Amino acid sequence: READRPGVWSCKNKHRYASQDLWPMRVTEFEGVKARIPYNFEEILRAEYGDKSLVVEEFQGHRWNRDINEWVQMTPDEIKKSKEAAEQRKKEEEAAKQEKHD
């Protein structure tokens, strides 16, 4: 805590959080172990990583597996297919934008 900022907490990485965003903590499970997470975790994640942070299911070569609630490393083939699909979506979005302007 910083004496000149009552009600604000900071971590070793200089991130600052309001007390009401942290407490009361929620109990969850992380890798099979009970853990406490900030009360307003969704807003904290959005502020730090953007709106997509709560919906994107692929990140840096990993995919969220909903069945086991864990990030699983993707195979090289899955990564390749994912990149190709993203490139195709981008082309389609650009084509749709172009049609609107024509």
Image: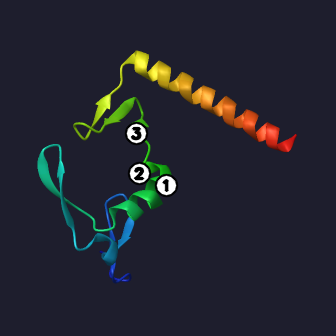
Q: Residue 38, position in %: x, y? A: 27, 65
Identify the mark at residue 51; answer none if there is no mark: 1
Amino acid carrying mark 2 in the image? Leu
Question: How dense is the environment of label 3, judged by Cα within 10 Å: few (below 14), some, or many (20 and up)?
Answer: few
Q: Are marks 1 and 2 in contact (CB under 8 Å)?
A: yes
State which quarter of the image contains the C terminus. top right
Q: Residue at x 44, y 43 (%)?
A: 56
Indicate the secondary structure of the residue bearing disc 2: helix
Q: Please tell me the numbered disc located at residue 86.
A: none
* In the image, residue 54 above or below residue 44: above
Disc on the earlier residue, 3 or 1: 1
Question: Along the line of sight, which residue is nearer the eye, 70 or 18?
Answer: 70
Residue at 40% across / 29% down in the picture?
A: 61
Instruction: State left or right for residue 45 relative to residue 90.
Output: left
Whole-percent x, y for residue 79 in the image: 44, 22
Residue 9, how many percent across, how many down? 32, 72
Image quadrant where one finds the N terminus? bottom left
**Residue tagged 3:** 57
Q: Secondary structure at mark 3?
A: loop
Horizontal side of 76 relative to 36 (left or right) equals right
**From what the image shows, is residue 1 above or below residue 100?**
below
Please name the residue that numbered disc 2 is placed on.
54
